[in-house]
Amino acid sequence: MIRILLSGSNGKMGKVICNSVSNFPELEIVAGIDRNTACDKFPVYCSPENCEAEIDVIVDFSRPDALDGLLELAKLNKTPVIFCTTGYTKEQLEKMKEASREIPVFRSANMSIGINVVNSVLRNISAFLYSNYDIEIIEKHHNQKVDAPSGTAILLADTIRDSIPEETEYTYGRVGNSKREHKEIGIHAIRGGAIVGDHEVIFAGQGEVIEIKHSAISREVFAVGALKACEFMFGKGPGLYNMDDVIAEN
Ligand SMILES: NC(=O)c1ccc[n+]([C@@H]2O[C@H](COP(=O)([O-])OP(=O)(O)OC[C@H]3O[C@@H](n4cnc5c(N)ncnc54)[C@H](O)[C@@H]3O)[C@@H](O)[C@H]2O)c1
């Protein structure tokens, strides 16, 4: 059995993971960390320092401020840690990278297989299309989401930017009276209702428009991706891993 510590266990994603884990016979959630410690399935600790459980993997769907404590806990026994939370600062991402020299660290702003396939399509087509098409990204999420734009929109934008040799620049939520410059990659966030997560990348040319769209219909896709990442990360050595590594192994 692979014993999981679930950070953010009382949140929306935490609860979906608790339901989905029964489809993974090798995995068991043995403890949680959450500000809300109510749970009748396993012990939930209010912070990583209090965690007494024996664990093999840590999965986090909480808030960026949980990062330091989780890294410290992971370092104690070189436990692989999977960060699915979004909204990290550049400094926090750098901390993860630094820690990955010592422990196995996985990070992905989107755990769905579909988005990661879209991401690899973008890697292949963006440089070719860029000279004749303007690129804009629109993301839509539920009204409880705190970070904007979404981590996934940033993931897709970074992939596009990194595959185009020319210099580009992000324009967030366009307002004002000036014309669009070609080097801009527009990123727009919409918040409302219960939308699980939509991402659309638009390549707008003079005579045609290409739209690549992904809709998450249920949070289960993220839970399944995170649980697959648990299986993947078990027993891994230090390094920085992401969803591409999981897809490549499956
Ligand atoms: N990578 C992905 O595929 C993916 C998918 C969905 C959500 N997310 C991200 O996961 C995070 C959680 O999403 P959610 O919808 O479950 O949110 P949520 O608000 O429903 O749940 C967050 C949970 O974390 C707890 N929490 C907050 N701060 C904490 C801390 N410092 N330590 C421990 N627990 C803490 C809260 O009490 C809550 O129970 C968000 O950042 C979200 O954007 C990522």
Image (cartoon, helix red, strand yellow):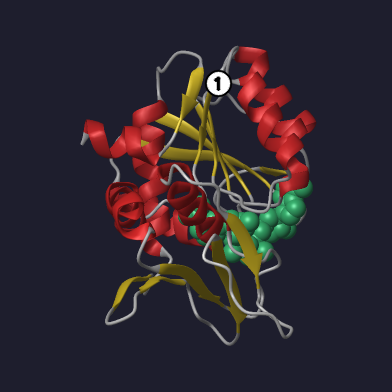
Please give the name of the residue rendered at 66% of the width and 68% of the height, measured from the top-left corner.
172
Res 129 quadrant in image: bottom left
Q: Is the residue indicated by label 1 positioned so its CB lies within 8 Å of ligand 1? A: no
Is residue 203 among what the camera can see? yes
Please give the name of the residue rendered at 57% of the width and 17% of the height, measured from the top-left corner.
103
- In the figure, is residue 172 to the left or right of 210? right
Q: Residue furthest left?
A: 250
Q: Position of residue 179 (x, y in %)?
A: 62, 79
Q: Position of residue 210 (x, y in %)?
A: 29, 74
Q: Locate the C terminus by quadrant.
A: top left
Q: Position of residue 239 (x, y in %)?
A: 49, 19
Q: Which residue is mark 1?
A: 79
Please give the name of the residue rendered at 61% of the width and 13% of the height, measured from the top-left corner.
77
- In the figure, is residue 157 to the left or right of 19? right
Q: Amino acid at mark 1?
A: Thr
- In the figure, is residue 179 to the left or right of 230? right
